Image (cartoon, helix red, strand yellow):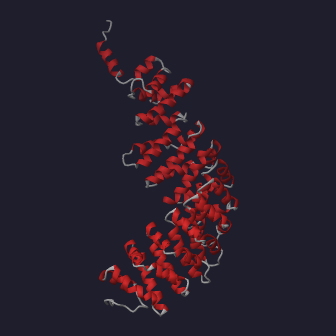
Amino acid sequence: MRPQCYPSANFISVEHLNFLQVLITWQSVMSLLRPLLLDVVPTIQQTAALALGRLANYNDDLAEAVVKGDILPQLVCSLSEQNRFYKKAAAFVLRAVGKHSPQLAQAVVQCGALESLAICLEDFDPGVKEAAAWALGYIARHNSELSQAVVDAGAVPLLVLCIQEPEIALKRIAASTLSDISKHSPELAQTVVDAGAIAHLAQMILNPDAKLKRQVLSALSQIAKHSVDLAELVVEAEIFPVVLTCLKDSDEYVKKNGATLIREIAKHTPELSQFIVNAGGVAAVIDCIGSCRGTVRLPGIMMLGYVAAHSENLSMAVIVSKGIPPLCTCLVEEQEDHLKAAAAWALGQVGRHTPEHARAVAVANVLPTLLSMYMDTHSSEDLQLKTKRALKNILQKCTYLPALEPLLQDAPPNIMKHIVGQFSKVLPHDSKARRLFVTTGGLKKVQEIKAEPGSLLQEYINTINNCFPEEIVRYYSPGYSEILLERVENYQPVL
């Protein structure tokens, strides 16, 4: 049945709105709805505000039409005077306009909405608080200037009070808004910390509500990421070992946000990474990587890389905790290049310290995979860069020759020099390695390498050749078999 062109003001369905969108210009729609905001019947006011919110929520063009129609000042003026139903609808309009872009969010700020929304955070009705917190979050998430405006309106202490309310939905939105404020700069995160948010957020890590845990872990991550001091404050709230239970949660986003929090703490200093290792964090993250797929793995992969990068001992902790096999699995299994790049980077951080570290990575047979990805023209630029750096980091320390030898066949010159360089360091001092190098065909492969005269690669080849008798080197040189055959043909036997 075809909808009416002019439905009753207290029943405006989505179908009616869609019909209006097709039939009338946006400005006409706004001019029809705006007078209804001042109607004497409260239900009509609320429904008109809700209709405007739905329109503004649809796309940024409609949201801009709401701004140009001078509707926002009218909503803000009546926000503190109307009943709870109107307040929720008005906050929905402000949220719907502000979510699309920083420019539209700035328009909401300029009409004085932040102060009114902050007052709504003190409302008796939890639904009004929730709607106001949601609107503030959508404004704050765009950039640091808008986030600072939310702070200046006095919203942060009230949001901290909201996360202490019994209503789960209000807790979720308040935690999300604190996360949106904290993410932009250390100063904004410090403002949230100064309001006492960390202690209350930390207490909710074990809340059974998965959606709340997502937001709590996100907020703590956004605080911890900025500096050592802020990360230490989060750790001092005794989130370990409690946060490790989130890595086993059935909700994928809880897992991901938990791993992100641990990563943001681990990246700062060796001391913080060591604290996480001592709490069992590395082993828990490794288990988490093994139990999930896709982007959920990413923060855990990066966390292992950050821990390993700090020192030899921390890298060895990753190795001892059996962290290399899951990283290799991610490198092979994952389809997205950014996940492969992260795994390659992490493996490079594990193997870059000493020959022992490099050997631990090399024996996992990951070097051919890294080389293949680096040389694959379909690999993204970032993946090629990360695999190249990982290969360089590992090869420069690796003295385990059986892992290096397969690379002699296909490696390009910029990688080959690191491979051959390691052979030139080991072979002069190891007779068994020299014998094995000949019998496995390594010496023959080296003779087939075409190096520029006077290059570093040529110097390495010369060093290797000097480790063997001249006739052996000559025997494995390209074309020597033809020379021998020619000598056979030209040989005159003595009769």
75 left or right of 486 in image: right
The x, y position of residue 492, in whole percent, is 30, 9
Residue 276 image offset from top left, x and y in percent: 66, 54
| Image height of 378 relative to 115, above or below | above
Q: Is residue 248 above or below residue 421?
A: below
135 with respect to 198 (left or right):
left
Residue 177: name its quadrant.
bottom right
Q: Is residue 463 visible?
A: yes
- Is 459 in front, or is 72? 72
* Left or right, 401 with reference to 201: left
Q: Residue at x 53, y 70 (%)?
A: 137
Q: In the image shown, does 429 or 294 lie closer to the viewer?
A: 294
Q: Position of residue 27 (x, y in %)?
A: 34, 80
- Whether residue 247 is visible to the viewer of this picture, yes or no, is no
The count of marks equals 0
Quadrant location of the N terminus?
Answer: bottom left
Q: Quadrant of the C terminus?
A: top left
Q: Position of residue 310 (x, y in %)?
A: 61, 45
Rendered image quadrant of residue 212: bottom right
Q: Residue at x 64, y 51 (%)?
A: 273
Residue nearer the viewer, 382 or 494: 382
User: Can you say whether 457 is above or below 67 in the image?
Assistant: above
Residue 290, relative to residue 31: is it above or below? above
